[in-house]
Image: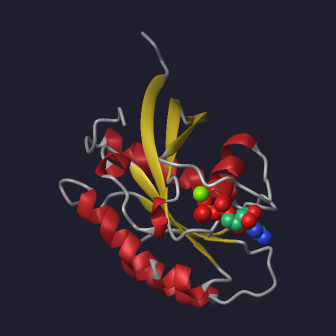
Amino acid sequence: MNPRKKVDLKLIIVGALGVGKTSLLHQYVHKTFYEEYQTTLGASILSKIIMLDDTTLKLQIWDTGGQERFRSMVSTFYKGSDGCILAFDVTDLESFEALDIWRGDVLAKIIPMEQSYPMVVLGNKIDLEDRKVPQEVVQGWCKEKDIPYFEVSAKNDINVVQAFEVLASRALSRVSEGHGDGTG
Ligand SMILES: Nc1nc2c(ncn2[C@@H]2O[C@H](COP(=O)(O)OP(=O)(O)O)[C@@H](O)[C@H]2O)c(=O)[nH]1
Ligand SMILES: [Mg+2]
């Protein structure tokens, strides 16, 4: 008998163009930060294997390829996902205000629509001086929606691992309880 369980999880990251989704993913998976990223075409997927309790998790994290500009993400992007990161930029109020719509888009594509679908909110770029979105405002919104909130910086690697791992852990619990099939 294999004492270790293995679970594949599909996670997705959404939010306005330029908030730092690709940077967050690269910081988490590759421990690197580049000032410039090519806007990729189509979705890109990064994988990372982590241990959580007695489980080996293979995370497949799906990033948009610039379609967030048109909010025209194809349904394969959301399909079978086990959890979602909602990202915004703390120096860009509009990117925070857009979270309501992003959350609605994601929930509408999760079949059956499910309130317990795991999400986390990441307020990125806290290394910058000109913050526009007060922490209390985000906390209020997240509390109302019952979503954990993390203030992060992809650039300075602040709170990035914590945020991804809280999402992974919630996604694992949900899969273990029988929602989703755990195959991504
Ligand atoms: N200062 C700062 N800049 C960041 C941070 N994360 C991303 N950026 C910059 O924001 C821009 C957009 O990042 P990108 O990851 O391409 O955003 P995406 O469109 O959401 O994927 C790039 O110039 C990044 O270098 C951060 O934590 N701090
Ligand atoms: Mg990107």
Q: At x 80% / y 59%, what residue is drawn?
A: 35
Relative to residue 11, is residue 105 depicted above or below?
below
Residue 6, horizontal then vertical, whole percent: 46, 25
Seen from the viewer's position, the closer of residues 137 and 127 is 127
Identify which residue is drawn at 58% across, 89% down. Answer: 136
In the image, taking residue 35 as reference, residue 19 lies left or right, namely: left
- Counting labels gives 0
Q: Is residue 43 above or below residue 151?
A: above
Give the colour scheme shown: secondary structure
* Quarter-of-image position of residue 134: bottom right
Is residue 100 shown above or below 4? below
Ligand 2 visible in quadrant: bottom right
Give coordinates of residue 10: x percent, y percent. Answer: 43, 42
Image position of 159 (left or right of 63): right
Nearest the eye: 85 or 6: 85
Quarter of the view holding residue 99: bottom left
* Residue 55 visible to an observer of this rendering: yes
Q: Is residue 139 visible from the viewing direction of this image?
A: no
Q: Quadrant of the C terminus?
A: top left
Question: Image point 70% across, 61% down: which residue?
Answer: 159
- Residue 63 location (% of width, % of height): 52, 51
Q: In this view, which residue lies farthest toward the left?
A: 112
| Residue 165: image location, x then y, percent | 58, 50
Task: Return the residue nearer the eye: 164 or 177.
Answer: 164
* Residue located at (62% from left, 69% from top): 18
